[in-house]
Amino acid sequence: MKVKNLTKRFGKKVVVDKLSFQVYRQEVFGLLGPNGAGKSTTIETALGLKKADGGTAEIVGMNPAAKRKKIFERVGVQLQSSNFQNNIRVEEICEELSALYESPADYRELLRQFRLEEFMRQPVEKLSGGERQKLSVVLALLPGPELVFLDELTTGLDTAARREVWQTLKGLKERGMTIFLTTHYMEEAESLCDRIMLIKQGKEIITGTVEEVVENSPYDNLEDAYLWYMAEEGKR
Ligand SMILES: Nc1ncnc2c1ncn2[C@@H]1O[C@H](COP(=O)(O)OP(=O)(O)OP(=O)(O)O)[C@@H](O)[C@H]1O
């Protein structure tokens, strides 16, 4: 994935401010920043789901504005606000979505990996918040994507479930998947991400491995370093 000078405005407010970055094959890349920093908007604009006001994005070698259908055959997306059809059951939504792809992943296997198999016949609206969150990750993985976007993938998950999701994602990476994620959990970034980018008010603050980001700060752990970067930027 290649993004160059990506810019998005809502009215007069610049929400994504000339962001440039690349995500390499089989890498886990994490986008970090406070509430409202522009993480979701970056994903949506890069994917062409929202129209950019400037810059370019290339996803799996294609321009999302021109090749949306082709891209979504190869790319999975989990967005924060997943809407589900009323009364639909877990199994039905998996089947309906699988039918859209040429060689979908085995959804039963995915439901098993995410410990959702017992809910197969349950209406989605009766799932707990965490179960629904895990289902939205399963749905993003249904195309058998080579690149997947996961927006706050473990928000609402308990500690054990979070660890299990990390293990599953590490396995998928080992089998060749590239992962772009956003998170508010520093532990998640440390456990999963090969590189991270910190943004504030739509602007890049720093990009690098967790070690590099920490080394460039006066602190020796990511959480303190992150808070320092966010405060420092305000002072400049
Ligand atoms: N459709 C919209 N119209 C106007 N403003 C919007 C719209 N969508 C998002 N914004 C604003 O753009 C900014 C960035 O929002 P975005 O959802 O990208 O942030 P985020 O970094 O993902 O935040 P969070 O961590 O809270 O999910 C916010 O100030 C938000 O209020």
Image (cartoon, rainbow, N blue to C red):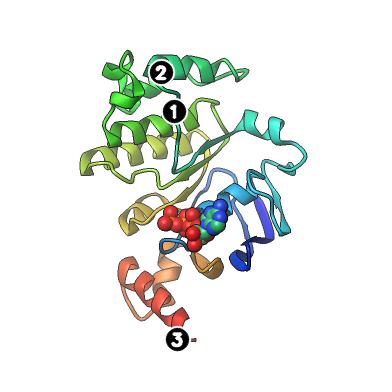
Q: Answer yes or no: do the residues labelled 2 and 1 have beta carbons within 8 Å?
A: yes
**Residue nearest the observer in this picture, 94 or 27:** 94
x%, y% of residue 173?
Answer: 47, 39
Tell me: residue 99, above or below residue 47.
Answer: above
Q: Answer yes or no: do the residues labelled 2 and 3 have beta carbons within 8 Å?
A: no
x%, y% of residue 76?
Answer: 54, 34
**Residue nearest the observer in this picture, 33 or 105:** 33
Please, what secondary structure does the residue beneath circle 2 have? Answer: loop
x%, y% of residue 198?
Answer: 48, 65
The residue indicated by pointer 1 is 84
Q: Is residue 74 left or right of residue 170?
A: right
Q: Is residue 172 visible?
A: yes
The residue indicated by pointer 3 is 235
Q: Answer yes or no: do the residues labelled 1 and 3 have beta carbons within 8 Å?
A: no
Q: Is residue 98 left or right of residue 88?
A: right
Q: Is the CB atom of the residue marked by disc 3 within 8 angstroms of ligand 1's nearest atom?
A: no
Instruction: Name the mark on residue 88.
Output: 2
Quarter of the image for residue 138 reads top left
Which amino acid does the dot numbered 1 rest on? Phe
